Protein backbone atom coordinates (compact mmCIF):
# COMPACT_ATOMS: atom_id res chain seq x y z
CA UNK A 1 0.00 0.00 0.00
CA UNK A 2 1.09 3.57 -0.60
CA UNK A 3 0.41 6.86 1.15
CA UNK A 4 0.97 9.92 -1.06
CA UNK A 5 1.21 13.46 0.34
CA UNK A 6 0.92 16.07 -2.43
CA UNK A 7 2.76 19.38 -2.12
CA UNK A 8 1.71 21.15 -5.29
CA UNK A 9 3.07 22.30 -8.67
CA UNK A 10 6.76 21.83 -9.31
CA UNK A 11 7.37 25.45 -10.24
CA UNK A 12 10.31 27.16 -8.61
CA UNK A 13 8.13 29.74 -6.90
CA UNK A 14 5.88 27.28 -5.09
CA UNK A 15 6.08 27.38 -1.31
CA UNK A 16 3.58 25.47 0.83
CA UNK A 17 1.91 27.50 3.57
CA UNK A 18 2.76 26.47 7.11
CA UNK A 19 -0.21 24.79 8.78
CA UNK A 20 -2.15 24.13 5.59
CA UNK A 21 -3.71 20.72 5.01
CA UNK A 22 -2.30 18.98 1.95
CA UNK A 23 -3.97 16.48 -0.40
CA UNK A 24 -3.20 13.07 1.04
CA UNK A 25 -4.23 9.81 -0.61
CA UNK A 26 -3.86 6.19 0.43
CA UNK A 27 -3.78 3.53 -2.31
CA UNK A 28 -4.90 0.07 -1.25
CA UNK A 29 -3.77 -3.33 -2.48
CA UNK A 30 -4.92 -4.15 -5.99
CA UNK A 31 -5.03 -7.03 -8.44
CA UNK A 32 -5.43 -4.99 -11.62
CA UNK A 33 -3.00 -2.58 -13.28
CA UNK A 34 -3.28 0.91 -11.92
CA UNK A 35 -1.98 4.15 -13.36
CA UNK A 36 -1.80 6.89 -10.80
CA UNK A 37 -1.85 10.50 -11.92
CA UNK A 38 -0.86 13.47 -9.85
CA UNK A 39 -2.94 16.48 -10.68
CA UNK A 40 -0.86 18.89 -8.61
CA UNK A 41 2.55 18.02 -10.00
CA UNK A 42 5.55 15.96 -8.96
CA UNK A 43 6.13 17.57 -5.55
CA UNK A 44 5.01 14.71 -3.34
CA UNK A 45 6.09 12.31 -0.63
CA UNK A 46 5.28 8.61 -0.97
CA UNK A 47 5.31 6.18 1.92
CA UNK A 48 5.18 2.41 1.36
CA UNK A 49 2.97 0.82 4.02
CA UNK A 50 2.46 -2.73 5.12
CA UNK A 51 -1.31 -3.39 4.95
CA UNK A 52 -1.45 -4.37 8.62
CA UNK A 53 0.25 -1.08 9.50
CA UNK A 54 -2.26 0.83 7.35
CA UNK A 55 -5.04 -0.92 9.28
CA UNK A 56 -3.60 0.46 12.51
CA UNK A 57 -2.96 3.92 11.05
CA UNK A 58 -6.34 4.53 9.44
CA UNK A 59 -8.67 2.43 11.56
CA UNK A 60 -10.92 1.25 8.74
CA UNK A 61 -11.40 -2.21 7.21
CA UNK A 62 -8.72 -2.59 4.56
CA UNK A 63 -11.14 -4.09 2.02
CA UNK A 64 -12.74 -0.63 1.82
CA UNK A 65 -9.45 0.70 0.40
CA UNK A 66 -8.70 -2.23 -1.93
CA UNK A 67 -8.19 -1.33 -5.57
CA UNK A 68 -8.77 2.42 -5.16
CA UNK A 69 -7.14 5.63 -4.06
CA UNK A 70 -8.89 7.20 -1.08
CA UNK A 71 -8.53 10.78 0.15
CA UNK A 72 -7.78 10.70 3.86
CA UNK A 73 -10.40 13.40 4.33
CA UNK A 74 -12.97 10.75 3.43
CA UNK A 75 -11.86 8.43 6.22
CA UNK A 76 -13.66 8.97 9.53
CA UNK A 77 -11.50 9.67 12.54
CA UNK A 78 -8.23 10.24 10.67
CA UNK A 79 -6.69 13.60 11.74
CA UNK A 80 -5.43 14.72 8.35
CA UNK A 81 -3.78 17.78 9.83
CA UNK A 82 -1.57 15.65 12.05
CA UNK A 83 -0.26 13.81 9.00
CA UNK A 84 0.27 16.69 6.59
CA UNK A 85 0.28 20.18 8.07
CA UNK A 86 3.40 19.56 10.15
CA UNK A 87 5.24 18.35 7.04
CA UNK A 88 4.88 21.74 5.36
CA UNK A 89 6.99 23.75 7.80
CA UNK A 90 10.47 22.21 7.27
CA UNK A 91 12.35 23.59 4.29
CA UNK A 92 14.33 20.44 3.52
CA UNK A 93 13.07 17.06 2.35
CA UNK A 94 15.06 15.14 4.95
CA UNK A 95 13.34 17.16 7.67
CA UNK A 96 9.94 16.56 6.10
CA UNK A 97 10.56 12.82 5.98
CA UNK A 98 11.55 12.90 9.64
CA UNK A 99 8.43 14.86 10.65
CA UNK A 100 6.10 12.57 8.69
CA UNK A 101 7.81 9.50 10.12
CA UNK A 102 7.25 10.82 13.64
CA UNK A 103 3.57 11.56 12.93
CA UNK A 104 2.97 8.07 11.52
CA UNK A 105 4.86 6.42 14.36
CA UNK A 106 2.74 8.28 16.90
CA UNK A 107 -0.47 7.14 15.19
CA UNK A 108 0.78 3.56 15.06
CA UNK A 109 1.24 3.63 18.82
CA UNK A 110 -2.38 4.72 19.34
CA UNK A 111 -4.24 2.69 16.73
CA UNK A 112 -5.95 -0.68 16.86
CA UNK A 113 -3.46 -3.50 16.46
CA UNK A 114 -3.58 -6.04 13.67
CA UNK A 115 -4.29 -9.56 14.94
CA UNK A 116 -1.02 -11.46 15.52
CA UNK A 117 -2.17 -14.44 13.43
CA UNK A 118 -2.93 -12.17 10.46
CA UNK A 119 0.44 -10.47 10.67
CA UNK A 120 2.24 -13.81 10.99
CA UNK A 121 0.39 -15.25 7.98
CA UNK A 122 1.24 -12.13 5.97
CA UNK A 123 4.94 -12.53 6.75
CA UNK A 124 4.82 -16.25 5.92
CA UNK A 125 3.39 -15.44 2.52
CA UNK A 126 6.01 -12.78 1.90
CA UNK A 127 8.95 -14.97 2.93
CA UNK A 128 7.70 -17.90 0.84
CA UNK A 129 7.16 -15.82 -2.27
CA UNK A 130 3.43 -16.47 -2.04
CA UNK A 131 3.70 -20.25 -2.22
CA UNK A 132 2.21 -21.26 1.16
CA UNK A 133 -1.40 -22.47 0.67
CA UNK A 134 -4.21 -21.17 2.87
CA UNK A 135 -4.34 -24.51 4.69
CA UNK A 136 -0.65 -24.19 5.52
CA UNK A 137 -1.12 -20.64 6.78
CA UNK A 138 -4.03 -21.72 8.97
CA UNK A 139 -1.99 -24.56 10.45
CA UNK A 140 1.03 -22.33 11.06
CA UNK A 141 -1.06 -19.67 12.80
CA UNK A 142 -3.28 -22.12 14.71
CA UNK A 143 -6.55 -20.72 13.38
CA UNK A 144 -9.26 -21.86 10.98
CA UNK A 145 -9.15 -21.02 7.29
CA UNK A 146 -12.42 -19.11 7.69
CA UNK A 147 -10.96 -16.97 10.49
CA UNK A 148 -7.90 -16.31 8.35
CA UNK A 149 -10.07 -15.24 5.43
CA UNK A 150 -12.04 -12.84 7.63
CA UNK A 151 -8.91 -11.45 9.25
CA UNK A 152 -7.19 -10.83 5.93
CA UNK A 153 -10.25 -9.14 4.44
CA UNK A 154 -10.48 -6.74 7.36
CA UNK A 155 -6.82 -6.12 8.14
CA UNK A 156 -4.99 -6.74 4.83
CA UNK A 157 -7.66 -6.03 2.21
CA UNK A 158 -7.48 -9.20 0.11
CA UNK A 159 -8.01 -12.91 0.88
CA UNK A 160 -4.82 -14.84 1.71
CA UNK A 161 -4.99 -16.84 -1.52
CA UNK A 162 -5.15 -13.63 -3.57
CA UNK A 163 -2.34 -12.07 -1.55
CA UNK A 164 -0.22 -15.14 -2.28
CA UNK A 165 -0.99 -14.80 -5.96
CA UNK A 166 0.10 -11.16 -6.00
CA UNK A 167 3.25 -11.79 -3.94
CA UNK A 168 4.29 -14.61 -6.25
CA UNK A 169 3.68 -12.42 -9.29
CA UNK A 170 5.72 -9.56 -7.82
CA UNK A 171 8.65 -11.92 -7.34
CA UNK A 172 8.32 -13.18 -10.91
CA UNK A 173 8.16 -9.61 -12.19
CA UNK A 174 11.40 -8.67 -10.45
CA UNK A 175 13.16 -11.70 -11.90
CA UNK A 176 11.88 -11.01 -15.41
CA UNK A 177 12.98 -7.38 -15.28
CA UNK A 178 16.42 -8.51 -14.09
CA UNK A 179 16.80 -10.49 -17.32
CA UNK A 180 16.00 -14.05 -16.22
CA UNK A 181 14.35 -16.24 -18.93
CA UNK A 182 10.59 -16.66 -18.54
CA UNK A 183 10.79 -20.47 -18.30
CA UNK A 184 13.37 -20.21 -15.52
CA UNK A 185 11.28 -17.62 -13.69
CA UNK A 186 8.17 -19.79 -13.93
CA UNK A 187 9.99 -22.72 -12.34
CA UNK A 188 11.61 -20.59 -9.63
CA UNK A 189 8.31 -18.99 -8.60
CA UNK A 190 6.22 -22.13 -8.51
CA UNK A 191 4.12 -21.73 -11.65
CA UNK A 192 3.07 -24.93 -13.41
CA UNK A 193 4.93 -23.89 -16.55
CA UNK A 194 5.79 -20.86 -18.66
CA UNK A 195 2.27 -20.76 -20.10
CA UNK A 196 0.86 -20.45 -16.59
CA UNK A 197 3.17 -17.51 -15.88
CA UNK A 198 2.19 -15.90 -19.18
CA UNK A 199 -1.52 -16.13 -18.35
CA UNK A 200 -0.98 -14.66 -14.89
CA UNK A 201 1.11 -11.85 -16.34
CA UNK A 202 -1.62 -10.94 -18.80
CA UNK A 203 -4.33 -11.14 -16.13
CA UNK A 204 -2.50 -8.90 -13.67
CA UNK A 205 -0.94 -6.34 -16.02
CA UNK A 206 -3.06 -6.34 -19.19
CA UNK A 207 0.25 -6.84 -21.00
CA UNK A 208 2.15 -9.76 -22.43
CA UNK A 209 5.56 -10.42 -20.91
CA UNK A 210 7.34 -9.29 -24.07
CA UNK A 211 5.28 -6.11 -24.39
CA UNK A 212 5.84 -5.18 -20.76
CA UNK A 213 9.59 -5.71 -20.99
CA UNK A 214 9.71 -3.79 -24.28
CA UNK A 215 7.90 -0.84 -22.71
CA UNK A 216 10.30 -0.90 -19.80
CA UNK A 217 13.26 -1.10 -22.17
CA UNK A 218 13.27 2.69 -22.41
CA UNK A 219 14.31 2.72 -18.76
CA UNK A 220 16.79 -0.14 -18.25
CA UNK A 221 17.37 0.86 -14.65
CA UNK A 222 13.73 0.27 -13.69
CA UNK A 223 13.19 -2.24 -10.89
CA UNK A 224 9.70 -2.72 -9.41
CA UNK A 225 9.60 -1.74 -5.73
CA UNK A 226 10.06 -4.68 -3.39
CA UNK A 227 7.08 -4.86 -1.02
CA UNK A 228 7.81 -4.97 2.69
Image: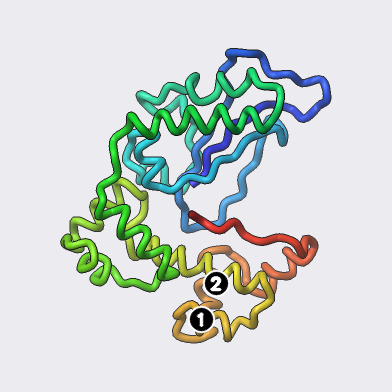
Query: Do tag 1 and tag 2 residues touch (Cβ < 8 Å)?
Result: yes
User: Up-down: is 194 above or below 163?
Assistant: below
- Residue designated by label 2: 172
The residue tagged with tag 1: helix, strand or loop?
helix
Number of numbered discs on residues = 2
Residue in view at x 23 percent, y 66 percent: 140
**Which of the marked residues, 1 or 2, is nearer the chain's N terminus?**
2
State left or right for residue 221 relative to residue 72: right
State left or right for residue 140 relative to residue 88: left
- Residue designated by label 1: 188
Colouring chosen for the image of the structure: rainbow
State left or right for residue 129 relative to residue 11: left
State left or right for residue 32 relative to residue 46: left
User: Up-down: is 112 above or below 126?
Assistant: above
Q: Position of residue 132 (x, y in %)?
A: 34, 72
Q: Position of residue 125 (x, y in %)?
A: 38, 64
Residue in view at x 62 percent, y 28 percent: 96
User: Up-down: is 89 above or below 40?
Assistant: above
How would you rate the neighbour count of disc 2 (Cα within 10 Å): few for under 14, some for 14-19, many for 20 or more? Answer: many
Q: Position of residue 194 (x, y in %)?
A: 54, 84
User: Up-down: is 13 above or below 164?
Assistant: above
Q: CA distance from mark 1 to mark 2?
A: 8 Å
Q: Position of residue 38 (x, y in %)?
A: 66, 37
Extreme right residue here?
12
The residue tagged with tag 2: helix, strand or loop?
helix
Residue in view at x 59 percent, y 40 percent: 46
Q: Quadrant of residue 91?
A: top right
Query: In the image shown, does 109 or 206 lie closer to the viewer?
Result: 109
Q: Quadrant of residue 215?
A: bottom right
Residue in view at x 41 percent, y 28 percent: 106
How would you rate the neighbour count of disc 1 (Cα within 10 Å): few for under 14, some for 14-19, many for 20 or more? Answer: few
Amino acid sequence: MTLVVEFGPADAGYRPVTGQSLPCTVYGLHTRPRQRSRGTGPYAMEVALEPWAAFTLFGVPMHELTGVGTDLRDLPGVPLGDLTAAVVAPSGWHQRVHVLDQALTARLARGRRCAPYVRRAWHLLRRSGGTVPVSGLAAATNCSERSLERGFREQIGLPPKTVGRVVRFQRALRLLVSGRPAAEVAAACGYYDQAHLTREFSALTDRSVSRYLLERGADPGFVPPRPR
